[in-house]
Image (cartoon, helix red, strand yellow):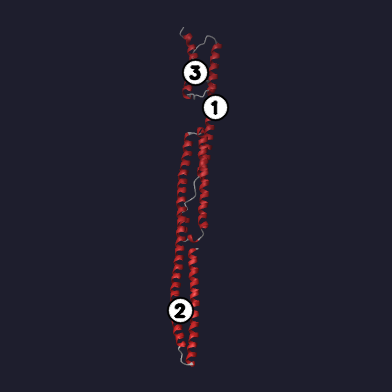
Amino acid sequence: MAGEDEYKKVLEEIDELESMIPDGIFSSEKPDWKSIWGQIRVVGASFKGVKFPTHDEHQEAWEHFQRIVAHVKESQAEEHQQWEEKKRESNEYKDEIIYQAELAKPSGPMGDLVLSIATGGLSTALSAIMGPFDERKDELISCSEHLKQGWALLNEHKENMLGRDKNEAYHALYQAKEQLDQAWADYKRERQQAFDDYQAERQRKHDEWVARIEANIDNLEDRRQSLLEKIAHREDILDNLQEKLNNAWSDDYRDNISSWIDEEEGKLNDLRSKLENVENWIEEARNKLNS
């Protein structure tokens, strides 16, 4: 009797196998393929030497078992295909993100430019000095856009990416971010330093120019003072000659004094003309300082 019921054990093993495939191919639960294939071997072995009540029942059970095995193979193949497709898509997303990360990395530092400015470039116009910095800014803005696009791609596709691909993409973006952040910090510092150096050089040159003008004014004022003293001296001489002329006791003596007076007046007029020129030059120099 026990031998006659052995076929029921086979049917129970088939039912057990079928229960291990959750809701068939449409299930969202991942099957345990190792356990399933272990049960398939158990079922296959259980058929050996077991008699069913009829040949038709044996055939029906065997065909049912074979349909399950075929279904398992089909499902496993489909899962493998889906896995390969996910790997391919994940790799494509990763490559696209890493490409954006590479584009987000700025070129080398601006040290050579800053050095050239510091060692003689300040005599050029400010626009010429700031031009390379404006180009650098455009480059960094472009890098920032690529980095932003890379992060957006990662956020958009991370659910469809494998863990190792997500990690590799994240590492590439983070590395690019560190380099870009440093480049922005260097750019701001170096641009401000170049501008400050330019302003300092301009101020130094302006101070030198002011010093030259003020020194020239001092020299002119000294010259004016000297001329004023000479004019005063000539005026004293003319006063004395005029007094002598008034007291002249002969015509010859009067003629001599008149000649001396004409000579001194000529010298005095020349000094006054020079004084006028000096005073005009002083006024022009002071206007330059006040302009």
Q: Nearer the viewer, residue 202 or 145?
A: 202
Identified at 50% across, 32% down, the residue is: 159
Q: What residue is disc 1 on? A: 78
Alpha-carbon neighbours of circle 2 within 10 Å: few (<14), some, or many (≥20)? some
Identified at 50% across, 16% down, the residue is: 15
User: In the picture shown, does residue 13 fall above or below 117?
Assistant: above
Alpha-carbon neighbours of circle 3 within 10 Å: few (<14), some, or many (≥20)? few
Q: x and y percent of residue 187 in the render?
A: 47, 50
Identified at 48% across, 60% down, the residue is: 122
Contact, mark 1 vs mark 3 (Cβ under 8 Å): no
Q: What residue is disc 3 on? A: 19
Q: How many marks?
A: 3
Q: CA distance from mark 1 to mark 3?
A: 20 Å
- Eye-nearest disc, 2 or 1: 2
- Eye-nearest disc, 3 or 2: 2
- First of labels 3, 2 by sequence position: 3
Alpha-carbon neighbours of circle 1 within 10 Å: few (<14), some, or many (≥20)? few
Dot 2: element = helix
The image quarter in which residue 224 lies? bottom left
Q: x and y percent of residue 279 in the render?
A: 48, 72
Q: CA distance from mark 3 to mark 2?
A: 130 Å
Q: Residue flagged by tag 1: what amino acid is it?
A: Glu
Q: Nearer the viewer, residue 279 or 63?
A: 279
- First of labels 1, 3 by sequence position: 3
Q: x and y percent of residue 197 in the render?
A: 45, 57
Q: Nearer the viewer, residue 239 or 143?
A: 239
User: In the picture shown, does residue 9 fall above or below 115?
Assistant: above
Q: x and y percent of residue 248 in the render?
A: 46, 90
Q: Residue flagged by tag 3: what amino acid is it?
A: Ser
Identified at 50% across, 39% down, the residue is: 151
Q: Residue flagged by tag 2: what amino acid is it?
A: Ile
Q: Which mark is residue 231?
A: 2
